[in-house]
Image (cartoon, coloured by chain):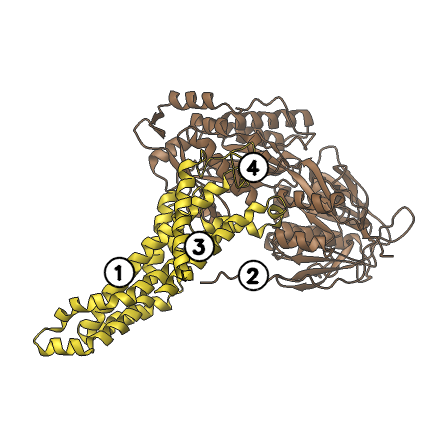
Chain colours: A yellow, B brown
Amino acid sequence: MTFAHLARWLLTGLVLFAFVVLLVSRNSYSNQDRESPLAGASVLHPAGTDALGRDRLVRAAFALLLSTGGAVTASAVTTAAAAGVGTLAAFGPASVGWLAMLVCDVFLALPWLFLLMMVRSALPLTTSPANSAAITFLVLAALGWPACARAVYRGALGLRKAEWALQARAGGLRSGQTFRYALPNLLSLLLPQFLISIPAFVIAEANLGALGLGIGEPLPSWGGMLLELDNSALLVQTRWVYLPVALLILMLLLLEALVAEV
Amino acid sequence: MILAQPCAGQAAPRAAGELAWTIGYDPKTFDPAKVDDQESELVRYLTAGVLLRFNRSTQKIEPKLAESWNLSSDGRTLTFQLRSGLQFSDGSALTSRDAAWSIRRVLLPATGAPVAQEFLSPGGVTVETPDDQTVVVRLPQRVIGIGKVFDEIAIEPAGHPSEGRITAGPFVVADYRRSQYVRLRRNAHYQERDAAGTALPYAAGVRLDILDNPEQEARLFQRGEYDIINGLPPDYFELLKRRLPSSVRDLGPSLNTEQMWFNQASSSPLPAWEKTWFQNRDFRVAVSQAIHRADLARIAYEGHATPAYSFISPANRAWYDSGISAPHEDVAAAEAKLASVGFHLRGSILEDASGRAVRFSILTNAGNAARLKMATLIQQDLAALGMQVTVVALDFPALIERLMHTQDYQACLLGLENVDPDPNAMINIWLSSSPNHQWSPSEKTPATPWEAEIDRAMNQQAGTSNEAQRKLAVDRVQQIVADQQPFIYLVYPNALYAVSPRLRGAQPTVLEPGLVWNIERLRLQEAR
């Protein structure tokens, strides 16, 4: 069994475990057990509680699912958008291709962090935590496609000049018609792009959360939980503060291993 | 996508006999007349020579550069008798001419000194110097606590304002590196001596590092780079208590308050129905009753805070009134109160009489862990009433923009630092015409009868010197505030300090500047 296989099983196991934790636990991610803030491990809170008495295990499990789910969705959106733009640019008229790549370059040149900050600060203050999470990943997806689109464009251009495409055109197919035969050939390019984007989005969301711009309280997010590590006063009180960062690193490692597989 | 971390700064090397601690930001000015922010005020406190000093420990006025002073019976003439042989830090003589010049400079509108407002009508004040040692100040009207105003007026060489470089106080500004440090040097010509006749101050200098990072501050304090921490956050208090038990001091409730308020301004861009909620007394009282203040103190402050129901802290012995009846925690009463004014539950969501879900956000400033925790605890407390609350942390400039300019916010959670125990110092918060009247700033006429009554009572206490009458008027204001809850008081944070075991002479007080009010007598124990 390769490491990549192991990674796949571990990842599935981790996600399943998170689901089980959420189903089985009597605590919710926002429930504040005010009698035991910053508690150690106990029967009721197997990984202790945070500064507000919320169950760490439930919050970490929820953050794991939320961030993975959000990143996978964002990544799917990004890859689909990139596939659309990239192939359109490659198979369309030259002017369309030129314009599409120009738009890509503009997007790549944008200072995305400031853009995200602007988008977040323009949201109404009463944006609910769930909406803030959806918007965060949507914005990440909206900003993530250009690099991927460039890769797809290169790949699609190569296909357009491939011998089978030349033959098809010689046989009377128009450029637009060869497009649908090109798409399956692009899969080997799109799948890694899809997989690469997932950990990138997980990290991006964690960064935004650490800046206070990501998912709103009381929804748990990696960024918010990692912020606790900046406080040595907390670290001496409970070792469980390290749980989220350990889980996050494990997740990222496994996700990267999946990319290596394809 | 890498998160940039500000690189961990190193404290500047320490000069011999120098005390060191941190300030949160660059002082906005070194001109003692123009001080309007906390850090500039600290520098002024450490450097300025003043006629009178308000003793932070005894809470009494003491003569400083003045040998004696008196206030005429009509409260309109002050006479200061200067000490003889006074000198500035450059060795030049300090006479009544310098004192008069410095007072006049503060009074001039062109100077724009915030202190001038405390004279009520600064334009009518005259200053005379009958001889080299005497200064006579005549006021057009009586001013409550006029002695304390002179605690804020630095005496500078006449005609040569020096931004703290030539002073008559214990220290002078020696060096300033933007966003790094302010360095103060001992004033060798300072007139005061201790009981044994040794010249004060003991310390050779002071270095104020500009650092707004409690984590780093606590680390450098433990390494002995800093001698004190003023306003220690509660979580770091617990950390230092474990590591250096003898270094931490909890003086109990400070004069400061943490409060939450709803935006009641009728000119705000909020929808009409939200204004109706926030202007409704029963709505505000219900919110106040639903908040578990004991939990806020215990969890957000790790027990280093006291539940608050009024703007005057129990630390303020002269003005605290335990007879105020404020709405205490009672969720059932809160529900009944909301029901009585047409709010009802649909499922688990509270709706107003016209069926609109009660949803609002609480703003607070980013970077204050205790406030963010309080807001999150309140979020859950109010969820019990069916209110959907979002917590939003904004950086300070963005927060002030919303509070003061656009007024585009629903509720806000912030603290108020009280430097002066006399409630007259808070007059700019209570008068409805004031821009600092946070829940509805700069009202042309009081918007409600109770605000008009607060105006009356505040003006009444400002206009008389009869202490019993003043106390009655302030008690009246406290009762109206408790009944109407324009500010929902949450906790009085405790005054928390850390003092290096090497530091001698520390006598912490709850009044600003806390640990360093007796800076002349602080010194480091020599290493053996």
Q: Residue B6 has which mark?
A: 2
Residue under pointer 4:
A37
Report the amino acid beneath label 4: Pro
Contact (Cβ within 8 Å) of mark 4 with mark 1: no
Disc 1 residue type? Answer: Ala
Q: Name the residue under label 1.
A: A80
Q: Which of marks 1 and 3 is nearer the N terminus?
A: 1
Residue B97 to residue B2: above or below? above
Left or right: B437 in relation to A75: right
Q: Where is residue A81 in the image (x, y as percent from the top left)?
A: 26, 61
Residue annotated with mark 3: A251
The label nearer to you, 2 versus 3, is: 3
Q: Residues within 10 Å of mark 4 (few under 14, many from 20)?
A: many
Q: How far apart are marks 1 and 3 (CA)?
A: 24 Å
Residue nearest the observer in this picture, A171 or B2: A171
In the foreground, B293 or B348:
B348
- Is disc 3 on the same chain as disc 2? no
Alpha carbon separation for disc pair 2 and 4: 30 Å
Q: Where is residue B204 in the image (x, y as percent from the top left)?
A: 80, 58
Residue shown at 54%/24% (left/top)? B328
**First in sequence: mark 4 vs mark 1:** 4
Count of numbered marks: 4
Which chain is mark 2 on? B
The quarter holding residue B31 reads bottom right
Residue A87 can be seen in this image: yes
At mark 2, the secondary structure is loop
Please tell me whether mark 1 sits on a helix, a strand or a loop: helix
